[in-house]
Amino acid sequence: MTNIKAHPAFTFLRSEFIDALNVTVQEFEHTVTGAKHFHIASENDENVFLVGLKTVPTDSCGVAHILEHTVLCGSERFPVRDPFFMMIRRSLNTFMNAFTSSDWTAYPFASKNKKDFHNLLDVYLDAVFFSRLDPLDFSQEGHRLEFAEPENTESDLTFKGVVFNEMKGAMSSTTSVLWQTLTKYLFPNNTYHFNSGGEPTDIPDLSYDDLLAFYRTHYHPSNAVFMTFGDIPADTLQEEFEAKVLSRFERLDTQVTVPNAKRYFSPVRVEEGYAADEVKEDGSHVVVGWLLGESTDLNQQFEAQLLSSVLLDNSASPLRRVLENSDLGRAPSPLCGLEDSNKEMSFMCGLEGVKKEDATKVEALIISTLEDIAEKGVPQESVDAMLHQLELSQREIGGGGYPYGLQLILAGLSTAVHSGDVIAQLDLDPVIEAMREKVQDKNYIPSLIKTLLLSNAHRVTLTLSPDDALETRRNAAEKDRLSKIKSALSDEEKQRIVEQSAALKARQSQVDDMSILPKVGLEDVPARLPEYDNQKLAGDLPITFYPQGTNGLVYQQLVIDLPELDEEEIAYLPLFSSMMTELGIGESDYLAVQERQAQVCGGLGASNSIRATIEDRQSLNGYFILSTKALVPNVKAMSELLKDTMLSVRFDEVARVKELVAQRRARREQSITGQGHSLAMTAASSALSGLAAQQEAWGGMSGIRSAIALDDAMKASDDAVHNVLAVFARLHGKLLKANKQLLLVAEPQHEAAILADVRVIFTDLPVGTEVSKFALKPVDSRVKLAWLTSTQVSFCSKAFRTESGEHPDVAALTVLGGFLRNGFLHRAIREQGGAYGGGASFDGSTGSFRFYSYRDPRLTETLADFDASIDWMLNEEHTEEALEEAILGVIGSMDKPGSPAGEAQSDFYVQLHGRSLAYREAFRAKILAVTIEQLKQVTKTYLVKENENIAVVTSTSKRAELEALGFDIQTL
């Protein structure tokens, strides 16, 4: 493309239109500093910005991570204490965050509003390149010494800091410990040897001067890459880059580099421990890891990706099949797969739930399996299916938590940071075509196994075993360290710690002049919600078709009204949903079905959509959903697979069910420290309605306990398996009799052909006759729960019973969460309390208002802060500007865009659950009209002691304290 304009300070290097993504990728270089700019030009109006910096720590003090936090605490042009969190509430952003990876730090945001985009760009550019890095911000975000009673030098000395506590929470996760320990040995001599997030034992070693030195060498345009996406032209963006940042810098003489790891000449075997409440005989993890080639070599990268997929993609893949069926462990390791975001890639596989003495057997099993696959080869259709999956993932416009443009940027970021070919990284079609040629050679996959794995001496086998004394030793070591520090302090040094605590508290309490920050206002909010065109076709199987720009994919869902179920069927409904697409069909066993899925579609999944009605929180609408997606040429095969699954799923594969239950248990146990705040909120809300109680029984801590008990029962006797399969069969029979409809999302030009195929295929699907409606027993009581587990931090929640549905107070309750977070909770829980996060939100489906904290070093003090925020709301004067910020936050979350398919599906389900466009627009109008007086009124009405429920997820060391406070103690 010759008409691409660049700003005079930039040199245009090249561009390429990528047909599969419908975008043009343009590459530029800043002439003076050498900073690269990659612009992904698209007609999408959700513009995305990211600046990435190669950050290469040489220890585990967490310097890159702490710097990421501290950089966002005020800058040259915006010298306020917390511009990042202030801008979150002065913006209509669709995404705002900052990330620290193992070798880069990135600062991304996205917005559909052009004024908002430029506001955020202004703040981000100044924050990254001209940060103030105040020592008090370092002490708040990183670490500091503080007395337990801040003004009493005779009280115990403690470590405080947001990142310090965040990493205590992160390293309470066994999966995180497994990953960090393995990479420590896989990379013996470079930056990946260290924990870039910071080890809690090492973080206090980082000095403020170390932070400044790292900033000066790493946060420079010569070490930066700018990446943008959307419909704002590249030269317009470059004009801002130049004026606001780049014109003030010269090129750095030194380059930040990552040397390759020193290679081992023979395999290494290591043993370490992880903190556990009890030492189970089969509690070990065994993982075998290999160091591969460089990720910037696209040929090596895609060969490794293809090999990993062929070996591990699904249960029919030869290595995963052996791991899943092995009696040596409970389930495949969560680390199974390829890690290709580092400069050098690594491939891992292994088992969890292993007896420590069986570690060598696990290693031998993996090696012998690879040797067997290398000797016998892999069926050609299995290899072709993995290439099909690669093509499908290349074309799909994703949704979920990240904007589509940011997903593309992140896909190219590591390559950009390590000076690879970003355009080639994003344009997979030529790579897929080249691979199709290579895989015609039946020896291609076996030769990759031999070259990359079997002949590769740089192999590490890690055995990670439970240690029930580790946390006690760790806590004692920290206490001893602090005691020694305190005993060596002079009176003058003690006084300085007291003065720093007071200065930090004063800084946290100061009221900044927020007017120096740019903002959007309610006048910038779009007047209406978007409408989505769709066509409804009546018949025995009603069809709803949404024409959307899906880039050559078709999304299909069979939607079934959930009928009345008995208690046992309700209890096993999520398990049934998770297993239905993992079992055999008709004459085909589950292995054949997994292969069929990989060949024709992008996976098959089942789920449930259950919401309270607008009229009554105890009354429900429920739907069972079978979902899949495929490239347009595969619509017929995909539809046949969907129908066959619904009609002929098998409930006789006993070994398979046991294996899936074991895997599910492992996943659920691993999830606790990553989602502890959600688990605490679910527990606190569990007494407020039938749905809230059932959500806790399904997906809360009780659900995790049930998953453990079921796995144990199935291990003890096949009777438990047969009982579950009998329930599955009953459930399946009821679903076959229930009313059904079909949802289709695809590009409009394919509508006629898709509908013609689909109607023929689904003609023999049973017509629904079931009229009894899904229901749950009403629940309305109170809880004060404490769940104890292996964690170094706490997760706290309070839930208050409120109204729901169309009640006039719902709008004010919805705005109240953001208002309390912005004005009180963020400062009290995160900045002063040291938790990684905290806030409040309203859940309209269960009719509850919920407070929460995340990775929190405190417990009872945080619960007291929840109460203090209520007093603050009722007794202080509040500004209209604060109200506007809270309303903007609600509107921003309501308007957050998804993928084209995701937006259509969301529109379908909100209407299915009785929330029409008119209802949603009326609710939006009520949100925009909320007053401070209404906020005070709902606080006074609902956030009272008689409505209060409390739940915490915390360490077993807190048992005595919580029992004394009257908590109902629960364990897994």
Image (cartoon, rainbow, N blue to C red):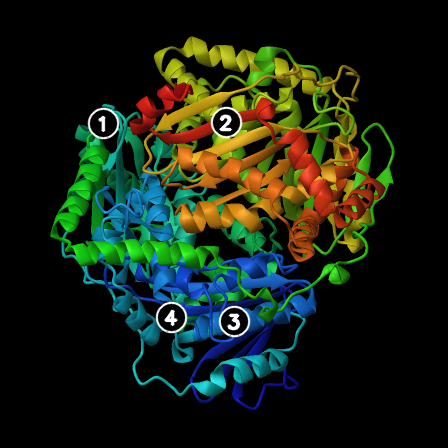
Spatial CA span between label 4 and label 2: 48 Å
Would you place residue 630 above or below residue 738 in this image?
A: below
- In primary-sequence order, the first of circles 4 and 2 is 4
In the image, farthest residue toward the bottom: 8
> Which label was assigned to residue 950?
2
Q: From the image, tell me which residue sits under label 1.
A: 355
Callout 1, which amino acid?
A: Lys
Residue 256: quarter of image: bottom left
Q: From the image, tell me which residue sits under label 3.
A: 78
- Residues under numbered marks 4 and 3 in contact, where contact means CB atoms less than 8 Å apart: no
- In primary-sequence order, the first of circles 4 and 3 is 3
- Residues under numbered marks 4 and 1 in contact, where contact means CB atoms less than 8 Å apart: no
Along the horizontal axis of the image, is 753 left or right of 701?
Answer: right
Quarter of the image with the C terminus in it? top left
Residue at screen point 75% across, 35% down? 742
In the image, farthest residue toward the top: 719
x and y percent of residue 444 in the render?
A: 38, 55
Callout 4, which amino acid?
A: His
Residue at screen point 25% across, 66% down? 260
Callout 3, which amino acid?
A: Phe
Residue at screen point 35% across, 46% down? 165
Q: From the image, tell me which residue sits under label 4.
A: 418
Looking at the rendered structure, the secondary structure element under dot 3 is loop
Would you place residue 346 above or below residue 654 in this image?
A: below
Looking at the rendered structure, the secondary structure element under dot 4 is loop
Along the horizontal axis of the image, is 752 left or right of 518?
Answer: right
* Mark 2 crowdedness (10 Å alpha carbons): few <14, some 14-19, many ≥20: many
x and y percent of residue 259 in the render?
A: 25, 69
x and y percent of residue 549 in the render?
A: 72, 56
- In primary-sequence order, the first of circles 4 and 1 is 1
Spatial CA span between label 1 and label 3: 56 Å
